[in-house]
Amino acid sequence: VQLQASGGGLVQAGGSLRLSCVASGRTFYSTGWFRQAPGKEREFVAALARNGVSTYYANSVKGRFTISRDNAKNTVYLQMNSLKFEDTAVYYCAADQMGYGLAYVSSYNYWGQGTQVTVSS
């Protein structure tokens, strides 16, 4: 599986961005979004289980971010609304076959290259 993340950019606080993660090869994997700010560890943001229905969110983004999948396009999206300065980070998508432990970096063997999201205050 190869993953290609895109959609990052510079946005003012309160604005929105939509990240995309296109998968080549096998599909219908569990997919997660993680982020890493300078000097911090990579942290969980959101995940979509391989059934394409069950979703999970970090408390810090719940109610503001939405993860979804378009099977026809082999693409998982992360819609980010009401962005805050503290959302600034490099965002990574990840995928794997498992159906549990979706919030853990160690659960994923396939990673995209990352896309920078910068929120100005």
Image (spheres, rainbow, N blue to C red):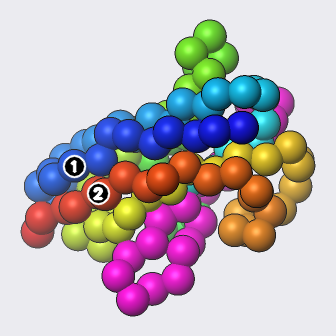
In the rendered image, residue 17, in percent from the top left (x then y), is placed at: 29, 41
Q: Is residue 61 visible?
A: no
- Circle 1 — which element? strand
The disc at residue 9 is 1
The disc at residue 29 is none
In the rendered image, the vertical position of residue 33 relative to residue 26, given as above or below: below
Which kind of residue does numbered mark 1 sit on?
A: Gly
Query: Can you name the residue that lies furthest to the top here?
Result: 72
- In magenta segment, residue 51: yes
In the rendered image, residue 29, in percent from the top left (x then y), is placed at: 78, 36
In the rendered image, residue 8, in percent from the top left (x then y), is placed at: 30, 47
User: For this view, does 28 lie left or right of residue 116?
Assistant: right
In the rendered image, residue 73, in percent from the top left (x then y), is placed at: 56, 15
Report, in whole angstroms, how far the alpha carbon at label 2 lies from the one at label 1.
5 Å
Magenta span: 34-57
Q: Residue at x 50, y 39 (%)?
A: 4
Q: Residue at x 62, y 22 (%)?
A: 74
In the rendered image, the vertical position of residue 77 relative to residue 116, given as above or below: above
Query: Can you name the residue that lies furthest to the bottom here?
Result: 39
**Which residue is under mark 2?**
117
User: For this view, does 7 lie left or right of residue 30?
Assistant: left
Quadrant in which residue 31 is drawn: top right
Q: Residues within 10 Å of mark 1 (few under 14, many from 20)?
A: some
- In magenta segment, residue 99: no
Contact between marks 2 and 1 (CB within 8 A): the answer is yes
Q: Nearer the viewer, residue 48 or 24?
A: 24
Q: Earlier in the sequence, mark 2 or mark 1?
A: 1
Q: Residue at x 48, y 53 (%)?
A: 113
Quarter of the image that includes the N terminus: top right
Q: Is residue 56 visible?
A: yes
In the rendered image, the vertical position of residue 72 relative to residue 21, given as above or below: above
